[in-house]
Image (tube, grey):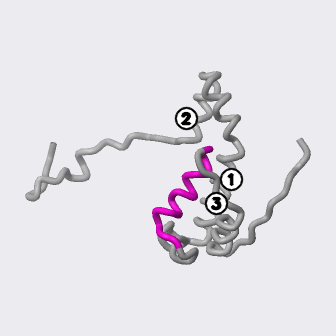
Amino acid sequence: MKTTANTRPTADTYAHVPFNPADDAARLQRESPAFAQAWTEQEDEFAALDVLLRARQRAGLTQAQVAELMGVKQSALARVEGAMTSRNHTPSLATLRKYAQAVGYRLEFRMVPQ
């Protein structure tokens, strides 16, 4: 391995490893019935997380910036975003409203027929 004077690896020593989470998830859904079932059971949570992350991205804000606007620590905001794919803790509507306001959105809650 090539190193610099301070023994850190140089950029040319690492090969890019392609990784596309969406492609991997789609492949696993086709190949593994257990994965497909687990994915389906959490589909709403994944969609909710996607909404949060896209809103933050569109606002051009980092997690730390949104946390500051919400008046919470960055680690607390990370737990909110992480909780969207975990059934251990679900953020309250008040927390989701604060998040939406911090990124310049309004929270809208609706139900649609199946």
Tag shown at residue 72: none
Tag shown at residue 24: 2
- Residue at 86% x, 52% y is 111
Magenta part of the protein: which range?
A: 72-87
Magenta segment: does it hold 81?
yes
- Residue at 91% x, 45% y is 113
- CB atoms at circles 1 and 2 under 8 Å apart? no
Corner quadrant of residue 44: top right
Closer to the observer: label 2 or label 3? 3
Along the line of sight, the residue nearer the viewer: 66 or 13: 66
- CB atoms at circles 3 and 1 under 8 Å apart? yes
Mark 2 Cα-neighbour bin, 10 Å: few <14, some 14–19, many ≥20: few
Mark 1 Cα-neighbour bin, 10 Å: few <14, some 14–19, many ≥20: some
Does label 1 or label 2 sit earlier along the sequence? 2
Along the line of sight, the residue nearer the viewer: 68 or 25: 68
Q: Secondary structure at mark 3?
A: helix
Closer to the observer: label 1 or label 2? 1
- What amino acid is found at the position of numbered circle 1 in the picture? Ala
Considering the image in quadrants, where does the N terminus appear?
A: top left
Tag shown at residue 52: 3
- Residue at 60% x, 50% y is 89
- Please name the residue that numbered disc 1 is placed on: 48
- CB atoms at circles 2 and 3 under 8 Å apart? no
Task: Where is residue 87? Give x, y as percent.
Answer: 62, 44
Marks 1 and 2 sit apart, C-alpha to C-alpha, by: 20 Å
Residue 93 in the figure: left or right of residue 25: right
